[in-house]
Every structure is written in C-alpha cells, then in structure tokens.
Image: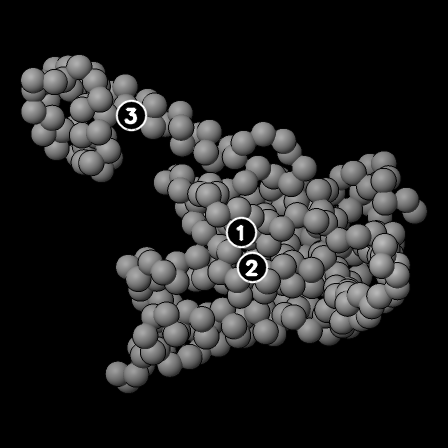
Amino acid sequence: MDKDELGECQIRDGVIVPLSKGRPVHPLLVLEAAKDLPRPADPDLPSAFAKLADGDESAICDFFVRYGLLGFMHYVDVQEAERRGVYDPKKPGEPVRWVLTHSKNVEMILRLVAELDHPTELKKIICSMTVSESGVASVEWRAPRRGTCAVSTVSEHVGDCRSTAVTIAANALRQNLGGTQRSVSTQKTDDGWRLKTEFIPRTLLDWIYWLLADAVTAQRVRICANARCKRPFIVTHERETYCPPAWGMKGVSPCMNRDKVRRARKKRSALGLGRKGIRAKVIARRLGEDLATVRGWLRRRSFRGRRPG
Ligand SMILES: [Zn+2]
C-alpha cells in the first residue's frame, strides 16, 4: 500500500482508524508503509502533539493525517491489552485513551520546563500536583510508559519547585526514550568519506519523545504570549513568543494574529474611554489590561495636557 493513499482517519468506539479511499486499513500496514519514510522534520512536533490533550476529536484526526500513526501496534502486547479491555483486535487502530495519556504527558513536560524561570507559575503547577498524607507532602502525576494504556501514578517528595519540576520532567521522559537506537553510517562529502552518527526512532511516538528531550534539555520551550492560548511550544528562534503556524503552513503565527486583533480592539476601546476623560487606572481595570500598556496607549494619543492616570 502506498503511503499517499492514506488521507483520512476516523474515530470509532474510542479507536483511531486509518482510512484509505474511505475504507479502514489495518494500522500495521500503515506503519509498514511509513517505515522507511523520513520522520517529520517539524521541530515543534512535540507541542503539536501536546495540543491534542484537550481531547478534541477533529484535532486528533488532523494530527494523524498530517503526521501519521504514533505506532501503538509496535509496542503493545495485543493479548495483554485485550485482557485489560483497552484493545480489540477486531477493531484495529490506536486507542484514543492511549494517545491522550501520552499527549498529556508531553504537555506536562513542556509546561514544567517552559515555566522553570517563572517561579510564581511554576509554584502553581507544583501545588496543583501536590498531595499531603499524614503531614508528608509529595507530588503525584500519571506516568505513561510507551505502549502501556494503564498509567501508573508516580509520587516524589517535594523539594523546592524547580528541583521538583526537573525531577518530574526527567522521569516522565526517561521511561519513554527506550525506542530510539543509535547507529553509525558512512557518508561521502567533498572532503571524502566520513562517519556519520544516526538516531533511528522506531515509531512516531519515539520520535516525538526524542525531539522533546532535545528541546527541554536545551530549554527551548516557552509559553505562548497569547493570553487565550498560553500553551507551551518549542522555540526555533530567540524572538519567537507565539505558537508557530502548523507544520507545512506558510505565514505568521495564528496566535500572534489573533493577539494583534484583540489588542487593537482593546486599544480602540481604551482611546474611546480616554477621550471621555476616564482615568487610565479605571480603563486598565475595565479592559483587563495592565496599567503601563494603557498609559502608553493614552500617552501616544492626543491626551496631552491631561494626566493619563
Ligand atoms: Zn498559542
């Protein structure tokens, strides 16, 4: 089967089923067809995957059409999964529950690392994961391990927020990195033959965790500046502050565009209120904007002679 024949997928009874020309295809055939293809070159792939954590079915289908199957069939002990009731061989596909568990895990790792230098936000996350038993506090999180559908709950004693965050991120990553092999190949260059190291991920999920490990160890993760998004993403250049457009899409970040439109609307409202003589402090409170920004807007307009706030 040609990989190009795959263009759709469908979610049926909690299972993602790949389709070819409108008919279900066994996922092993799909994985076999994709085996020799290069892995998607999108550095932001882990954050695109993390966005599925909301459970939106159309977003899940879009992701699978864009990037392919994650590789559940390569990990799973079919009999064991069948016994646990998470897999039915008569309905082959990738269980949505399994996909979401990994997506949430990737989201958690990205968010913890993105907030490492923001103590207030980091504290909020760690507090939300902290449980206290008999006066002893520990953090708990659900940890998927590659092919397992059932996640175990892992507990760590709470240290300071930063050390707790990196410990969680390291543990959650470590147990999902086992699928990538290192190999060495030969390469002919202008200077002659040389050795080249290669990392070969077996599945798309292995590739996601591999890219994620690279991004978080280099701390190339940020929270989107759009207040309505605030999702973590992987930065590819220093000045990036918004989620990038989806892989293969041209143009600027949709999050940046939406933020620009929203801010222009707020600025117009602020100027309108300013013209009525309302003080900057009141405007800022009313619009939910910070005072310095509102003062800046008013100062640049024709309110000279009037105190902005
Ligand atoms: Zn965003």
* Gap in angstroms between the C-alphas marked 1 and 3: 29 Å
Q: Are marks 2 and 3 in contact (CB under 8 Å)?
A: no
Q: Residue 215 — which label?
A: 2
Mark 3 = which residue?
266
Mark 2 is on which residue type? Ala
Say if residue 187 shows up in the picture. yes
Q: In this view, which residue lies farthest toward the right? A: 1
Mark 1 highlights which residue?
234
Relative image position of residue 116 (x, y in whole percent):
39, 62
Reply above or below: 170 against 300. Answer: below
SS of the residue under disc 1: strand
Q: Find residue 34 and name its label.
A: none
Does 89 appear above or below 256?
A: below
Measured in 3D between alpha carbons, the distance from the residue under mark 1 to the one under mark 2, in whole angstroms, is 7 Å
18 horizontally vs 228: left or right: right
- Identify residue type, mark 3: Lys
Where does the image place residue 271, in percent across and percent down from the top left?
21, 19
Q: Given contact means CB atoms under 8 Å apart, are the residues at marks 1 and 2 in contact? A: yes
